């Protein structure tokens, strides 16, 4: 109960819901961080996928040559 009373007093003093604003800001920052991480991973995915495809084609060519009589 003391925390709620303290928060209510802070709200009156500052004119805003401080604990809730802090939580909202924390979640917003967390979402922005996650979105930045996802964007970074998406940017890395395409070149890695292209490299994997090239290597797969090379491997297929080598296998074909080894299987030729």
Image: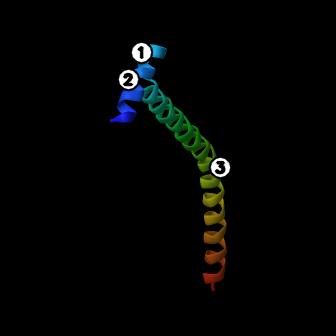
* Residue pictured at 65% horizontal, 49% vertical: 47
Between disc 1 and disc 3, the foreground one is 1
The quadrant where residue 56 appears: bottom right
Along the line of sight, which residue is nearer the eye, 13 or 67? Answer: 13
Along the line of sight, which residue is nearer the eye, 3 or 24? Answer: 3
Distance (Cα) linking label 1 and label 2: 6 Å
User: Looking at the image, is mark 3 or mark 2 earlier in the sequence?
Assistant: 2
Which residue was labeled with disc 1?
Answer: 12
Across and down, in percent, residue 58 comes to 67, 66
* Residue pictured at 63% horizontal, 53% vertical: 50
Q: Secondary structure at mark 3?
A: helix
Which residue was labeled with disc 3?
Answer: 47
**C-beta proximity under 8 Å, tags 1 and 3:** no
Distance (Cα) linking label 1 and label 3: 54 Å
Question: For the residue carrying disc 3, how many other residues have a C-alpha within 10 Å: few (<14), some (14-19), or many (20+)?
Answer: few
Across and down, in percent, residue 9 comes to 41, 21
Which residue was labeled with disc 2?
Answer: 8
Q: Is residue 21 above or below residue 3?
A: above
Across and down, in percent, residue 48 comes to 64, 54
Among all residues in the image, which is located at the extreme left?
Answer: 1
**Left-right relation of 3 to 25:** left
Q: Secondary structure at mark 1?
A: helix
Distance (Cα) linking label 3 and label 2: 53 Å
Along the line of sight, which residue is nearer the eye, 63 or 26? Answer: 26
């Amino acid at each position: 109960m003391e925390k709620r009373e303290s928060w209510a007093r802070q709200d009156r003093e500052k004119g805003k819901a401080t604990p809730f604003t802090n939580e909202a800001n924390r979640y917003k920052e967390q979402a922005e961080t996650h979105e930045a991480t996802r964007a970074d991973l998406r940017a890395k995915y395409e070149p890695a996928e292209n490299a994997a495809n090239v290597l797969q084609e090379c491997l297929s060519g080598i296998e074909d040559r080894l299987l030729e009589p």
